[in-house]
Image (cartoon, rainbow, N blue to C red):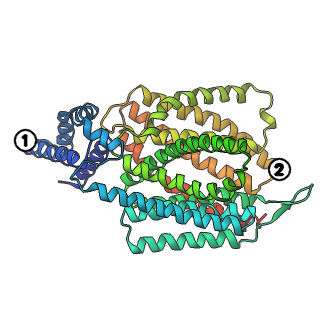
Amino acid sequence: MSVDLEAQIDQWRGFVARRPAMTTDDIVEMEDHLRNQIADLAAGGLAEDEAFLVAVKRMGNLDDVSREFAREHSERLWRQLVLIPEPGTGVVGSRWRDLGLVIGVALLAGIALKILVESLDEFALIRNVAFVLVPAVAGWLAYKRRVSWRVAAVLTAVAAALVLVVNLYPFEMVPLPGGGEDPGMTAVLVVIHTPVVLWMLTAVAYAGGDWRSHGRRMDFVRFTGELAMYLALIQAGAGVLIGLSVGVWNLAGFDLEPYLENWILPFGIPGAIMVAAWLVEVKMNVVENIAPVLTKVFTPLALVMLVAMFAVMVLGDSFDAVDRNLLILMDAVLILVVALLLYSISAHNPMEPAGVFDWLQLGLVVAALAVDAIALSAMLTRIAEFGWTANKTAALGLNLILLAHLAWTGWLTLGFVRRTGTFHDVERWQTRYLPVYGLWAAVVVVAFPLIFSFA
């Protein structure tokens, strides 16, 4: 079979793997059936790409197939949902070992964070906390993916160089009128962008070192979205429990807050992150992902928000008096739109034709571009009037990167809904563009302090 056909089968396999109730054996069985169908059709005179499409069509709707598997194997699905693997599969010991490793990594990260809390001042702690939390996840993923020693050494070296840059740069501190000091703009930008660089390094670990694989890049997008959702749920539950505990202990005349700050948070934060990452890995092939489902709800709401924002910016009296906060606001809006698009695309069936929701996504992109075009002109006007600063340059640079991402996504989505292009083009553009964000974050962290004299 040709390389193109193998790529199509690989894409199909990745989509099947995200269906509920599908195990590895089920997927292997379905793939074997698909390949036999393709071979028979090709022997009958069809081209490989035509044979693939016909064979997939004969396989039936994957959602129907997954529902049938769920009905036939409901006991198996329930066991998976409560973290109990099937007996005799050999997974029980492996899963408990993974959980033990996760707890061990979380404890080590908690100890490291506790040491930082005790030994560093507030701003130094903020600068370095990402170097504890993100590498903990990256290290665990590198172990899970059996990353080679060469790749692990490169990732470690890059992270170590980043530690030196963040801690050895002589950032300026701005005196406050009432006493004390605040970090300057370049220092704040470094704090914001350092986790982005580290998370891109984590993506390489997640991909097992094969960062060039578009499928693994998209898998990491799904992992990130699911991790955010699980972490939000864990934090909400922990917040309720901690709040109730503090209230009860206060009624008993015991102040729990010092222990909360000195012990519970330093160990609880890395613990929550590691457990969330572990849950995402365990549940990846068992239940439908959460983040893409939420995009179905928030995409229409985001579209309404953008339309209202566009009307306010066009009709409002204060448009000419915008300040630098508009840069931050617009970047936040565009990041939200990109996140919604990414997670929607990650859950899209690549074999299905364009539907109503695809048109809705196209409307979201167009609305975002319209709002950004107005805001961008105001940003450039203000920069021309007041000059360049590190903050304005970083915000504008990110804005232009997001603008390019959305503009080409809109063009490809238009082709998809008009049936002059394919969904594969839309998806591949997302995975190709992802490294741009990491590279820009690295430029901000390494070069901006030097360019703007650490101010």
Image location (x, y in percent) of residue 283: 37, 46
Image location (x, y in percent) of residue 266: 62, 58
Image location (x, y in percent) of residue 6: 23, 52
115 versus 351 height, above or below? below
User: What residue is shown at x 38% (from left), y 67% (from top)?
Assistant: 147
Q: Is residue 183 left or right of residue 410?
A: right
Disc tally is: 2
The residue closer to the viewer here, 176 or 95, is: 95
CA–CA distance between discs 2 and 1? 71 Å
Within the image, what quadrant is residue 451 found in? bottom right
- For the residue labelled by badge 1, is the local secondary structure a helix, a strand or a loop? loop
Q: Mark 2 — residue?
A: 386
Q: Amino acid at mark 2?
A: Phe
User: What residue is shown at x 42% (from left), y 25% (from top)?
Assistant: 356
User: What residue is shown at x 49% (from left), y 37% (from top)?
Assistant: 410
Give the quadrant of the N terminus.
Answer: bottom left
The residue closer to the viewer here, 149 or 124, is: 124
Within the image, what quadrant is residue 381 found in? top right
